[in-house]
Image (spheres, coloured by chain):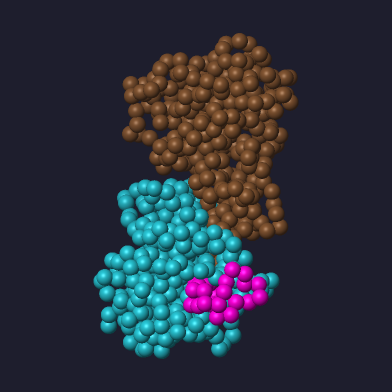
Chain colours: A cyan, B brown
Amino acid sequence: ISNIQPAEISANPVLDISGLNFIDLMVRQGNIENPPKTPLVPGFECSGIVEGPGDNAKGFEIGDRVMAFVNYSAWGEVVCTPMEFVYKIPDDMGFAEAAAFPMNFVTAYMMLFEVANLREGMSVLLHSAGGGVALLPDVLGRISPDGVDIVLDCLCGENTGKGLGLLKPLGTYILYGSSNMVTGETKSFFTFAKSWWQVEKVNPIKLYEENKVIAGFSLLNLLFKQGGAAQVKVVMDKLISLYKQKKIKPLVDSLWALEEVKEAMQRIHDRGNIGKLILDVEKSPTPLMANDSTETSEAGEEEEDHEGDNGNKERMPFIQ
Amino acid sequence: ISNIQPAEISANPVLDISGLNFIDLMVRQGNIENPPKTPLVPGFECSGIVEGPGDNAKGFEIGDRVMAFVNYSAWGEVVCTPMEFVYKIPDDMGFAEAAAFPMNFVTAYMMLFEVANLREGMSVLLHSAGGGVALLPDVLGRISPDGVDIVLDCLCGENTGKGLGLLKPLGTYILYGSSNMVTGETKSFFTFAKSWWQVEKVNPIKLYEENKVIAGFSLLNLLFKQGGAAQVKVVMDKLISLYKQKKIKPLVDSLWALEEVKEAMQRIHDRGNIGKLILDVEKSPTPLMANDSTETSEAGEEEEDHEGDNGNKERMPFIQ
């Protein structure tokens, strides 16, 4: 990102809210290649208020409500990221929803409509349903005896061959993460290396004979290593438009204080979440669970609760 | 295909015309798995006139001009294939064009628009340009320093890794054939086995890290082993519609008599052809090359020449 002027988008501490992703657990466990040197602030997406736009940050002003991709440091009270990764939050979207929005929706959309070619009548199988990506409202995995059209697999390793075997002809298998790398409490480097490198390889001739497609998708690599910000912007604009039409809505599982990050990560680790976990730097250290009315509510219904500087427990309709 | 009543679509000997494909050379060399027992009649696509539709061949009548996929035997004077593989020829399409139409266009269309996701502004790299698939008018391969969006590779083996390396992020590599299997004059089984089985395998993690897609496409397997006739029909109907709108047109390289099949195959083998070679059971044994006016002509221009029972050399505007 060296050739792009940072926009110095930064978040008002009161409102800095960040989405927790599996990749954050991998970072904590050292399960990624070339992490930045410690001390580091984790986090790859956040929402907040523009505190000081950079010289080239045209279109943004102090006080704008924004959500952003960040190459680490999204958990910080103040976040600085290039303008190309920053998006204005729709008026009826709260900060917690906004912190849950970018990674999950862009990953799901690009996998289903750009990598695969999802059309009406197709079936999608989600491994590890329960994580954020599994929760797109129109995407429910079903397995028919004929197989499925698309397999989304965040479990790398010995499941690859099995996933390929479930595909219909012309079906697409997409490996988009590696959540099984964080299933062990005390994962050694050796165990990690095994699951990462000794994954089952694929013979292209087999793909030819069976008419199958295998793909990998890493949004972070696309954004931060492969110059894909412009491609992602097209998708984000579509998704924001779909949100405004009330066709999609991020599902928030629970809000956590920074001090509770260990417990929050354990909840993801144990796959206890339905929806996204959100870190809120202002929240007091007690998890607030989403109540039933939140899970079935319509987009925009709680907008009054999200905004403003009122107390934490009043900001969102979460019960203890 | 056992559950489908054969339609007994058969060709009038005078007009039976068949497209020659690389797969026919592989069959001749024994380079396919589980070929039918000899004696066998090669050929996977043909055009002709319906001689005797089967009991369930609704919609077809004696005398209908048709083109068809056939699971072997397309070079026969009379061809029998299930109705689901048979299509009526548009009025302005000649029999030679029709024999050149199904495999190349369906393969190219499905690879570009169903396996990959070709959109405006994308680049396509064609290995082995010159064969039928390379000749879709709107598909011209260009390599930019940034890489290409789609690689269509009919050369299996050591080129796979190189092809993957040429892809942009989110790019798709499609292996759709194996023409390098027929490059040796006297290819031994051992050499064949090497190129077929020792192909470079792909690590899904590498696809994940690089955001890449690898796919295989075999139209014959889709049609004859995987029950894909209905999927292919949707595509054929679109392609026939595009032909009628004069947006696509098959390119015929030359017409050959059955007695000249050895020379015709040598021409494909040597990659001397630009466009499709056609076998015509009625033609006298001298190759007739397409002249310049044919190569630049519009669809339908030669329709008068294609039809009827007039002499061979008058049937098409080919010069000696």
Please report the residue visible at 63 percent of the width from the left and 42 percent of the height from the top: B139
Residue B280 place in picture, x, y as percent: 59, 21
Question: Does the magenta-highlighted stretch encompass residue B199?
Answer: no
Does any portion of residue B2 appear in the rendered image?
Answer: yes
Please name the residue shown 68% across and 58% down the image. Answer: B146
Residue A63 lies within the magenta run: yes
The part of the image, by quadrant, that contains residue B133 is top right
Q: Is residue B289 left or right of residue B176?
A: right
Q: Give the farthest residue toward the left.
A: A292
Look at the image and tell me whether residue B212 can be seen: no
Front residue of B38 and A134: A134
Quadrant of the rendering where the C terminus of chain A is positioned: bottom left
For image coordinates 41% across by 89% down, the residue present is A259
Assign the N terminus of chain A to one quadrant of the image.
Answer: bottom right
- B243 sits to left or right of A281: right
Q: Which residues are magenta?
A: A48-70
The spot of residue A210 in percent (x, y) is: 46, 48
The quarter of the displayed image where residue A305 is located: bottom left
